Image (tube, rainbow, N blue to C red):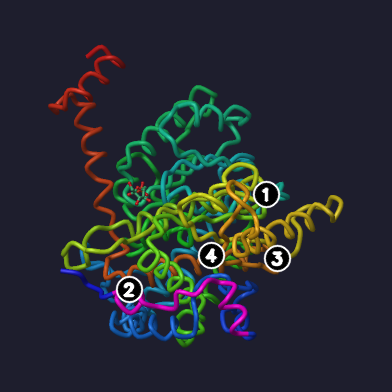
Amino acid sequence: MAARDWTAIRSLDPRPLSDLFAADPGRVSLLSLDVAGIHFDWSKTHLTSNALDAFVKLAGEAGLAEKRDAMFAGEAINVTEGRAVEHTAQRGEGAPESVEEARNFHARMRALIDAIEADALGPIRHILHVGIGGSALGPDLIVDALGRDSDRYDVAIVSNVDGSALEEAIEDFDPQATLLVIASKTFTTTETMLNAQSAVQWMSEGGVEDPYGKVIALTASPDKAVEWGVDETRILPFNESVGGRYSLWSSIGFPAALGLGWDVFEELLEGAAEMDRHFRFTDLNANAPVLAAFADLFYTQARGCETRAVFAYDERLRLLPSYLQQLEMESNGKRVTSEGEPVDYPTAPITWGGVGTDGQHAVFQLLHQGTHIVPVEFLAVIEPGDVLDPNHHRQLLLNAFAQGAALMKGRENEDGARAYPGNRPSSTLLLDTLDARTLGALIAFYEHRTFVSGVLLGINSFDQFGVELGKEMAKAADKGGLEFDASTTDLIKRAFGE
Ligand code: F6P
């Protein structure tokens, strides 16, 4: 049985975007907002004031405000795993005891960072962080976005079990000057444990007398880290209630905090907290994550859009699409409601994207003229990240804006292959600058948007049971204890002769 009735959403205003603009001179101010240094513009989507009303009604039926408050209050809203959802407590917004616990864990993290900076573990120049999924994507995004001019440490983040990834990362590292950081919420993830083991071996072969003395563990399972050989004083724990893909604010953010400096990490948390407060205390119809989720749901439920694209017109945000893929698809790629009933409507669209202007010369043809309607999200930053001729940045931004305009306008009065229907939706996020504070707010915005979509879809955004079977089967195949289908058996035989 369906959890939601989308009839009202499906029967919303069918007029094209150009008509919506012509009919309402106040459209841009109705559908744009400024929060935490980010300007959000949804006016090139098909949302209207009627649509907002319909969605606010739906949000009321879904209990969005109550569920949001329950999340911030530390209630066990992750019903399938019986857990609270407390990444916001890491930023100081949540149940007082969880905020207190997060502060203590952060203090411990900071003390270890101070000690490392004071050479307590010997002179360190390189940080080798091994982790995967949520234990890698967030730190990688932050270090890549903000660390370009930092000369504090070289940071390498290795996730893939493909040995080439580790080999490449350590190629220019001196094992004697390397700190090995093992990031794993569970401390059981095969890829991470194998990478960690190989990294210790590389350190040992490189003449490090006590490689385990230079290992830091970031985990919600400290006992397992101890068992693995990490000294208790170098384990930075975080709580189970912080989900893997929401964990960069916890000790999982260690490579960013050490690599960029504690002040930068604190700014990141403060920016996120500002977005938390906006989400928590602002009316639904003026609430950035809520409006973004409304637009997302309009396109999946009313227009049959199966994907959404995110194009960052800023190299510093080039890892954002992959970060969002895990956040959105692992959270909301579900087939049943929180109560376990199959849904009869689409859940998360496929998130994909890249950087502008590169995408314009590769995939934008489909966006403009293909048969799929893909809502596109453009991100751009007013303050340039480079010091070259300002024309670089001017061209970059003008291209971002022109693409949104072209998607909407199309090309009339042309025949056949040259004609574009236009009326293709896009939204734009324009950041004043890309500093830690704004980046924190941006990521928190995406987290809350994902949560809102999950609530309106009636699903639990905080479990991920769908990833288990493949892991189990790979483990079983390794032990040789599983009867596979003929195709898989043949592939294993070809690869290993078994
Ligand atoms: O396989 C999926 C997953 O469980 C993600 O949810 C998680 O971010 C990733 O694996 C890594 O898990 P861990 O931090 O426990 O190593």
Q: In 3D space, how far apart are the residues under numbered discs 3 and 1 (Cα atoms)?
A: 19 Å
Q: In the image, residue 490 lies at what x, y percent? A: 23, 18
Task: Tell whether label 1 touches label 4 (CB within 8 Å).
Answer: no
- Residue identifier under label 2: 456
Was residue 235 drawn as part of the magenta stretch in this picture? no
Q: Position of residue 326 (x, y in %)?
A: 41, 52
What residue type is disc 4 on?
A: Pro
Crowding near pointer 2: few (<14 within 10 Å), some, many (20+)?
Answer: many
Tag 2 near tag 3, CB within 8 Å: no
Q: Is residue 10 magenta?
A: yes
Residue positioned most to the top: 497
**Residue bearing the label numbered 1:** 357
- Sooner in the amino-acid sequence: mark 4 or mark 3: 4
What is the quadrant of residue 344 in the picture?
A: bottom left
Please, what is the three-letter code of the amino acid marked with disc 1? Thr
Q: What's the residue at 63%, 60% (across, down)?
A: 412
Query: Which SS class for mark 2?
Result: helix
Assign a secondary structure to mark 3.
loop
Residue type at mark 2: give it: Leu
Does label 4 or label 2 sit earlier along the sequence? 4
Q: Earlier in the sequence, mark 3 or mark 1?
A: 1
Residue 27 higher or lower than 165, as above or below: below
Pointer 1 with pointer 2, Cβ within 8 A = no
Residues in magenta, as a range: 6-24
Mark 4 Cβ inside 8 Å of ligand 1: no
Q: Kindly identify which residue carries mark 4.
A: 425
- Nearer to us in this view, 192 or 203: 192
Is label 1 in a helix, a strand or a loop?
loop
Nearer the camera: disc 4 or disc 2: 4
How far from the left and from the top, in percent, is residue 280?
Answer: 45, 82
